[in-house]
Image: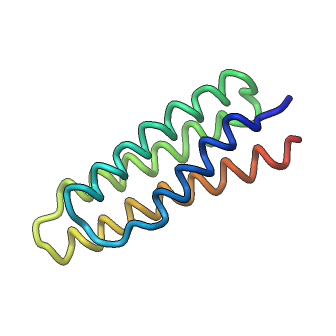
Amino acid sequence: MGYAKERGKLEKLLTKTAGINTYDEKSLAILVDSYEKYSHTVRILKNKEPELFLDLYTNELQQIKESRRTLKESDSDETRQTNFTGYKDSILHALEKTIKTTNETV
C-alpha cells in the first residue's frame, strides 16, 4: 500500500520543526501545530495499516504528550528551554520513525 501522500506531509513537518531552536510563543505554536498534524497523519496510517502503525500511534504520541506536559510544568527559563528542546526532539523522533516505517513498507 502506498503512503507517499502521508510521507510527504510528515517530511514537510520534519523540515518545519527541525529549524526551531529557541523557546518563544511562535516556536511553541509551530511545535503544537506540528504535533497536531503528526497526530492526525499517524492516525490515518494506523487506520489503513494497524499492524504497522499502531505502536507508533500509541508509543510515539505518548512520548510527545509526556514531553509537552513536562514543558508546561517548567518553572524557570532555563528548564523551560531544556524541556522545549526535549519536546521538539520527541516530535522529530516520532516524525523520523514514522517516515522510516512508511519507506520500509513500499
Residue plotted at (42% across, 37% down)? 36
- Residue 4 location (% of width, % of height): 76, 38
Colour mapping: rainbow
Using the image, determine if residue 50 lies above or below residue 87.
above
Residue plotted at (62% across, 51% down)? 11
Give the side of residue 92 with respect to residue 51, left or right.
Answer: left
What is the total number of numbered labels drawn onto the structure image? 0
- Residue 20 location (% of width, % of height): 39, 66
Looking at the rendering, which quadrant does residue 3 occupy? Answer: top right
Give the side of residue 49 with respect to residue 55, left or right.
Answer: right
**Is 41 or 87 nearer to us in this picture?**
41
Give the side of residue 71 with respect to residue 54, left or right.
Answer: left
**Is 6 or 48 nearer to us in this picture?**
6
Q: Give the residue furthest to the top.
A: 47
Q: Which image quarter holds the C terminus?
A: top right
Q: Give the residue furthest to the left.
A: 75
Using the image, determine if residue 79 lies above or below residue 98.
below
Looking at the rendering, which quadrant does residue 35 occupy? Answer: top left
- Residue 68 location (% of width, % of height): 31, 52
**Is 73 or 4 nearer to us in this picture?**
4
**Is 57 or 15 nearer to us in this picture?**
15
Give the side of residue 9 with respect to residue 90, left or right.
Answer: right
Looking at the rendering, which quadrant does residue 88 occupy? Answer: bottom left
Using the image, determine if residue 99 lies above or below residue 75.
above
- Residue 41 location (% of width, % of height): 57, 33
Using the image, determine if residue 79 lies above or below residue 53.
below
Residue plotted at (55% across, 45% down)? 59
Q: Which image quarter holds the N terminus?
A: top right
Residue plotted at (43% across, 46% down)? 34
